Amino acid sequence: MIKPLEEHVAAFALAIGKKLRAAREARGLSQLDLELRTKIDRANIRKYEKGQLNVTIEKLLALAAALDADLNFDLVLRNKVEQPPKSE
């Protein structure tokens, strides 16, 4: 069964958030440091990292620049086809 769009968006937001946090921590930065570098409120940064708020492209680009990180997109569209049950 194909998941509703909202579930895909939530999963994507959570995945982005985890990567943002990992990149920030790998550079030894706090959320306050990132706020000062980007002018993005740290409450929003916290919500991005937890997948509770969808980050806009503009904000994502600002965060990537502040983290000196590259944005790489590997988008794959899959056509899910229901397979008949295997007979035993």
Image (cartoon, rainbow, N blue to C red):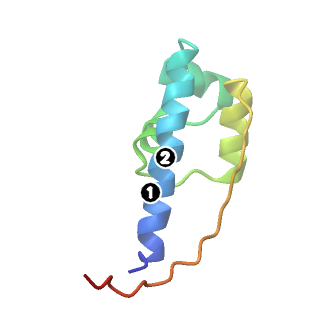
Q: Residues within 10 Å of mark 2 (few under 14, many from 20)?
A: some
Q: Which mark is residue 15?
A: 2
For the N terminus, the quadrant is bottom left
Q: Residue at x 54, y 17 (%)?
A: 26
Instruction: Tell which of 72 and 54 is nearer to you.
Output: 72
- How many numbered dots are placed on residues in this image? 2
Q: Where residue 63 sits: x, y (%)? A: 66, 34
Q: Position of residue 24 (x, y in %)?
A: 55, 23
Q: Position of residue 87 (x, y in %)?
A: 29, 85
Q: Residue furthest top?
A: 28
Helix, strand, or loop for circle 1?
A: helix
Amino acid type, label 2: Ala
Q: Do the numbered discs 2 and 1 sit on residues whose CB atoms are within 8 Å?
A: yes
Residue 86 sits in which quadrant? bottom left
Q: Residue at x 38, y 88 (%)?
A: 84
Image height of 68 relative to 42, above or below = above
Residue 86, placed above or below residue 12 = below
> Badge 1: few (under 14), some or many (20 or more) residues near its Cα, within 10 Å?
few
Q: Quadrant of the C terminus?
A: bottom left
Residue most extreme to the front: 88
Q: Residue furthest toward the left?
A: 88
- Residue 60 in percent (x, y) is at 66, 43
Identify the element where label 2 is drawn.
helix
Q: Quadrant of residue 66?
A: top right
Is 8 rendered above or below residue 14? below
The numbered disc on residue 22 is none
Cα separation, mark 2 vs mark 1, equals 6 Å
The amino acid pointed to by label 1 is Ala
Q: Residue at x 40, y 42 (%)?
A: 50
- Classify residue 52 as left or right of residue 62: left
Q: Residue at x 49, y 46 (%)?
A: 15
Report which residue position mark 1 lands on.
Answer: 11
